[in-house]
Image (tube, helix red, strand yellow):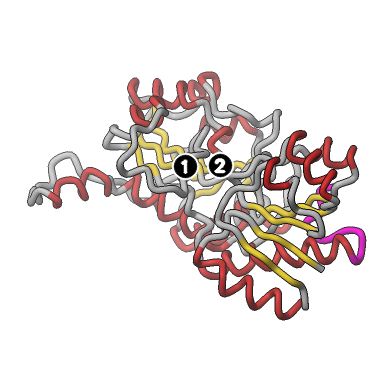
Amino acid sequence: MKIKLYEVREDEKKAIARVAEELGVEVSISSENLTPQEAEGLSGIDGVSILGRTTVDKELLDSLKRAGVGYVSTRTIGYNHMDVEYASKVGIHLCNANYPPYGVAEFTIMLMLLALRKYKPAMWRQMVNDYSLSGLQGRELRNMTVGVMGTGKIGRAVIGDLQGFGCKILAYDPYPSADLQGMAEYVDEDTLLENSDIITLHIPLMESTRHMINREAIAKMKKGVVIVNASRGELTDIEALTEGIESEQIGALAMDVFENENGIYHESRINDIIRNRRMAYIRQFPNVVLTQHMAFYTDANTDSMVECGIRGIVEMKEKGRCDGSLC
């Protein structure tokens, strides 16, 4: 079996070699995105694997189909960059990756603490030898009510990590988990928005959840609420978030993701003019922390994503589906 991986980072190469040897497959790699033009020349390749910068749309899928490529895996959990419906129509099988939730959960807790303890302005000050305390008084997590929106694998891990802090935990999910009773109190969405000091998002991006944190939702929140997003940037309306920061309805914002981050995050743009005015404006506030979509980025998760990316293609071809099958 022949598989080609695209968007390959240096840190993936060791795991790629290990998994390819274990499964007895022939693997080739490229650091570039997969384009329709590239796909036209993939005759003889059984499957391809990508990350989040490649858009698996109708044009690309048609090119893959003409080349005889039957399987596509994304080495990411999110798959909103893949047209699952059209892939199913043309008979190309798709799958996504999985990895343990602990790295993202720990990163989420870190973002909460950075926001509560005003680390961003403290860091700025020490860079110019200003070691004053004025304006840096923080709050303690143990005294907070934390609202966890989404109690899938990552949300559950966040709730588990929060147990040691002694805070009150509210949870919202259309499908509550009985085994979280005693660890968190399930409430409806409005109750969570109205009563949480910190709100953290762990909900998948769908049309029904796009911009779920909007002006109406923010207006229901406590004055000075802390919002944390290590899920998908499109869950939030950035215009509404900006207004919330300016009006001080939002006390702090910590985001590992950003709407329209493709072409910016995971690339060096140090000498470029970044044409994303919303990002450029909101990041200048002292109570806004932005990181570069790196909550997932641990050694354990990188290995798991590579494993899923290659093994998923093998299993889809040999068994008809895999654990992460989308179509």
Give the mark nearest the N terminus, 2 or 1.
Answer: 2
Q: Which residue is mark 1?
A: 228
- 223 or 263, which is in the foreground? 263
**Would you say the residues marked 2 and 1 are in contact, meaning their CB atoms lie under 8 Å apart?**
yes
Q: For the N terminus, which image quadrant?
A: bottom right
- Residue range of the region highlighted in magenta in the rendering: 318-327
Label 2: element kind: strand
Judge the density around disc 1: few (<14), some (14-19), many (≥20) Cα neighbours within 10 Å: many
Question: For this view, does 267 lie left or right of residue 307?
Answer: left
Seen as rendered, the residue at the extreme bottom is 22
Measuring from the top left, give residue 198's x and y in whole percent: 46, 41
- 162 or 10, which is in the foreground? 10
- 318 or 190, which is in the foreground? 318
- 321 or 244, which is in the foreground? 321
Is residue 40 shown above or below 272? below
Kindly identify the residue that appears in the image at 57 percent across and 51 percent down: 32
Using the numbered discs, state the Cα–Cα distance from disc 2 to disc 1 in whole angstroms: 6 Å
Using the rendered image of the protein, determine whether residue 230 is visible from the camera's viewpoint.
yes
Using the rendered image of the protein, determine whether residue 163 is visible from the camera's viewpoint.
no
Judge the density around disc 2: few (<14), some (14-19), many (≥20) Cα neighbours within 10 Å: many
Three-letter amino acid code at the position of disc 1:
Val
| Predominant secondary structure, magenta span | loop
